[in-house]
């Protein structure tokens, strides 16, 4: 049975218990075993960090919630780290992202600067324009991007690495 680590800022939500319940139900329906951060009561940052890395190492794949967190555009930095760690360990990384507009469009729409031509952020840095919904380094590390949690779980259940037998 495939084990899936669930990365994302959901652990900070008041309704995380309900989210975990939904994840578990969906995983059962698709024959997957979920590995969820926050299942153990850990208080020390080092303990949480090490525990989550151990869960990622135990997983066959990672499903990451890359929806914007604490802002309008970028995903949670901890989740991005977990994606990178999983990728470096050779894990399949599947994300879900509701708004899949390209990064340039997202930043242009979030900008309050009417003088901007849209190619430069209000802080003066160039905006990458690769028609990707996330930063190119993150986008290129993902095996797939879906629109919601259920779709990501369904994809993880059937996903095979290139060259992997059935």
Image (cartoon, rainbow, N blue to C red):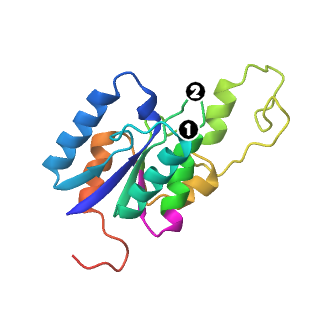
Q: Is residue 125 left or right of residue 127?
A: right
Q: Is disc 2 surrounded by few (<14), some (14 to 19) or many (20+) residues within 10 Å?
A: few
Residue 91 sits inside the magenta stretch: yes
Q: Position of residue 148 (x, y in %)?
A: 35, 39
Q: Are the residues tagged 2 and 1 within 8 Å (C-beta)?
A: yes
Secondary element type, mark 1? loop
Q: Earlier in the sequence, mark 2 or mark 1?
A: 2
Q: Residues within 10 Å of mark 1 (few under 14, many from 20)?
A: some
Q: Start and end of the magenta stretch?
A: 87-94
Q: What residue is at 27 percent from the left and 28 percent from the top?
A: 18
Residue sitting at x 48%, y 45%: 48
Q: Quadrant of residue 104?
A: top right
Q: Quarter of the image holding residue 133?
A: top right
> What SS does tag 2 mark?
loop
Percent x, y of residue 140? 56, 60
Q: Which residue is mark 1?
A: 76
Report the residue marked by disc 2.
Answer: 70
Q: Position of residue 50 (x, y in %)?
A: 49, 53
> Where residue 157 sits: x, y (%)?
24, 58
Q: What count of labels does the image hold?
A: 2
Mark 2 to mark 1: distance in Å? 8 Å
Seen in the image, is 117 located left or right of residue 99? right
Compared to 116, does 43 lie above or below? below
């Amino acid at each position: 049975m495939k084990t899936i680590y669930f990365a994302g800022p959901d652990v900070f939500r008041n309704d995380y218990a309900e989210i975990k319940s939904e994840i578990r139900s969906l995983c059962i329906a698709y024959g997957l075993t979920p590995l969820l951060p926050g299942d153990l009561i850990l208080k020390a940052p080092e303990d949480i960090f090490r525990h989550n890395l151990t869960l990622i190492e135990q997983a066959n794949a990672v499903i990451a919630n890359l929806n914007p967190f604490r802002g309008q555009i970028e995903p949670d930095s901890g989740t991005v780290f977990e994606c990178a760690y999983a990728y470096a360990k050779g894990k399949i990384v599947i994300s879900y992202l509701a708004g899949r507009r390209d990064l340039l469009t997202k930043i242009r729409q979030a900008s309050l600067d009417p003088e901007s031509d849209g190619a430069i952020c209000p802080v003066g840095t160039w905006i990458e324009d690769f028609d990707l919904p996330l930063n190119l380094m993150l986008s290129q590390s993902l095996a797939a991007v879906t629109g919601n949690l259920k779709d990501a779980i369904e994809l993880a259940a059937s996903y095979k690495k290139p060259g992997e037998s059935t």
